[in-house]
Image: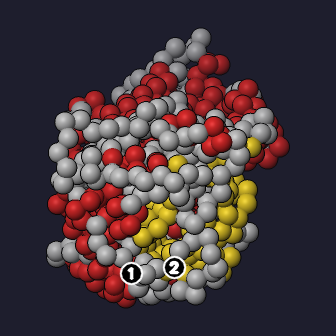
Amino acid sequence: MSDLLTEHVPAPSGSAGSRRVWRRLVRQPMTMASIAFLLLLVVVALIAPLIAPYDPLAEDFDAVLLGPTAEHLLGTDEMGRDTLSRLLYGTRVALLVAFGSVVVAMAIGVPLGLLLGYRGGWWDRLGSRAFDVADALPGMLVGFAVITILGRGLLNLIVAIGLIFCMSFARMTRAVTLAERGKLYVDAARVAGLRTPEILFLQVLPNLTGPLLVQGAVFLGSAIGVEAALSFLGLGLDSEVPTWGGMLGVAANEQAQQPFLPFPPGVAIVAAVLAFNLVSDGIGDALAGERRKPAGRPRRPRTGAAPVDGARAAALVKGAPGAAVDGGPTRPDAVLEVRGVTVDLVRPEGESVPLVQDVSLSIGRAEVVGLLGESGSGKSMLARSVLGLLPPATRLAAGSILLEGRELVGLSERQLREVRGCGIGVVFQDPMAALSPVHAIGSQLCEPLRAHLKLSRPAARERAAELLHRVGVEDPKRRLDDYPHQFSGGMAQRVAIAMALAAEPRLLIADEATSALDVTTQSQVIDLLLDLREEFGTAILMITHDLGVVAESCDRAAVMYAGQIVEIGEVKPLFSRPRHPYTAALLAANPSDDVEVERLPTIPGGVPLAGQWPSGCHFANRCTHSREGCTQHHVPLADDVRCLRANELILEVLKR
Ligand SMILES: Nc1ncnc2c1ncn2[C@@H]1O[C@H](COP(=O)(O)OP(=O)(O)OP(=O)(O)O)[C@@H](O)[C@H]1O
């Protein structure tokens, strides 16, 4: 079974999803016929003693090797035992071995695949090599070896066949987990403080339902084939025990005298294997239609110049409180203090390239700080370093991150888990990606409540309904049982905010939380965030491209460019009298209600890639004000601006 399978068989979400899958299955006659046949086999296995005309072990040497007769409808074997009775009893062994071995294979393969896929790195590389070795070994050889070591018997047969298949389950599970672990809902679960086993088994595993069902059905059929082959070779159960493979083995020896003998077990084996395969195909087809519909606008593509938008920037600038500025001494009211943070990309050859360089930023209680900048300037990487969720191949190379005075750098994953959720909440751009598609909203909201606030199940549900009500979801008790796809984009974002605030974090990181929403919903969500910061005193880091959002909601803003903060300050002066040419260029490229222009100016070129930053000022090669000296030396952040000419330039943006 190909790993690609996993791309086509998403898990059905919720009872409505299951009903849709079932309806699609019902429309497939071959699949339904196969299911009916397999159900018949199960019934036959259960009632074999009632319907078998003879004792399957009873020998009659006066009636050996008979063809079909009125007394023995399918003839007899070399001991005069009734073939029909043995065939009916053989169904029991076939199904028992099939289901038992698939359970064993899943019990070994699925946790292994989850672990390798989730951990990645060396674990994954070693695991993948082990898969390659396992692939190189013929499955039957593994079966022979296990039975030779453990001896014959039903349980050993089940274990042997389970071991043959377990690597396929591990490989498939690893592939799905690798794809799922990068998704936002997994990050959200980590931020919510769930432990790795909870994330793996409660969040990732449900997404495997589809692929596991498909692969499980195929291997049920294959297990019957392997059992038959091992019994045929005399390595299965004792020859007395009626099994389809054993009957085939006898038939092979006696075929010259009774040519009909191989047909009953042969047809039974082929029919059962075929039925399982048809059911597997049918389930795969039915699940393939069960794709999640994307919500909201797609993420803005990475463009070169001035992609900022929002018509309200200048008009909406609000008065900002006299917040402390960065770079100075530690603020007494600081919820978050980021000091000199540098994040490196570690290339395979070992070279380190900075993605974020020497960033310092602080956010006080109930303060909203905007983080602005073009795509690729390092905003998300900075946020991820605060969350302790840096992607693979990147590392925090330097700096300190204090949450209410507690140093987060150097904490173990376990300690970070305690901090996240309670200490920091996060809302991402696409709520549909941040919410697990296969869990009802209620259970997702209850997880952080139970994990951090240690609420009982009913109390967590009660609180979850209150939170939904608080973020403006109507009929919250009923909606707890709904799944993410049953919410509109705006409503889903409210749910995501409720989730982020469930454990009453001191810091909320909103990573382009309103970018995918229409303007009206965007305003409502911003109002909600601002209300919540008043109510809970939450500090908010608002990452956005949208100057209008910053103007409307932030007390201060930091402008990032090529991994550095180039300017930071209170929003009103920053927007009306920018001191860094990049800030001015961003503002100039922003549509404004105040000024009518035929064509908005853009910033020529694009943000340089990591590793290609110019020496000196990173913005110099796009800056119309740059001079020779700008590229010669490192430019420090001085008096909240990183520009050598800050004091001599007069940058106007609104009077174009
Ligand atoms: N997973 C990753 N591995 C390696 N480099 C990455 C990864 N994600 C981002 N980068 C690089 O890190 C730099 C900063 O990216 P980041 O995503 O933080 O920018 P951003 O300002 O948040 O952009 P956007 O607004 O588009 O999200 C870019 O050069 C980007 O190519």
Q: Nearer the viewer, residue 614 or 576?
A: 576
Residue designated by label 1: 321
Q: Which residue is at 36% across, 37% downward?
A: 602
Q: Nearer the viewer, residue 14 or 605?
A: 605
Q: CA distance from mark 2 to mark 1?
A: 9 Å
Q: Nearer the viewer, residue 333 or 508?
A: 333
Mark 2, secondary structure of its residue: loop
- Tag 2 and tag 1, C-beta contact below 8 Å: no
Give, as a three-letter code, the residue at label 2.
Ala
Q: Is residue 217 left or right of residue 438?
A: right
Label ID, residue 324: 2
Q: Which residue is at 50% across, 41% downward?
A: 625
Give, as a three-letter code, the residue at label 1.
Pro
Residue 276, placed above or below residue 436: above
Q: In the current view of this chain or complex, which residue is farthest to the front? A: 648
Q: Is residue 217 left or right of residue 167?
A: left
Queried on whether the Cβ of the residue with tag 1 lies below 8 angstroms from ligand 1, the answer reads no
Q: Quadrant of residue 249?
A: top right
Queried on whether the Cβ of the residue with tag 2 lies below 8 angstroms from ligand 1, the answer reads no
Mark 1, secondary structure of its residue: loop
Q: Which residue is at 52% across, 21% downward?
A: 262
Residue 464, placed above or below residue 61: below
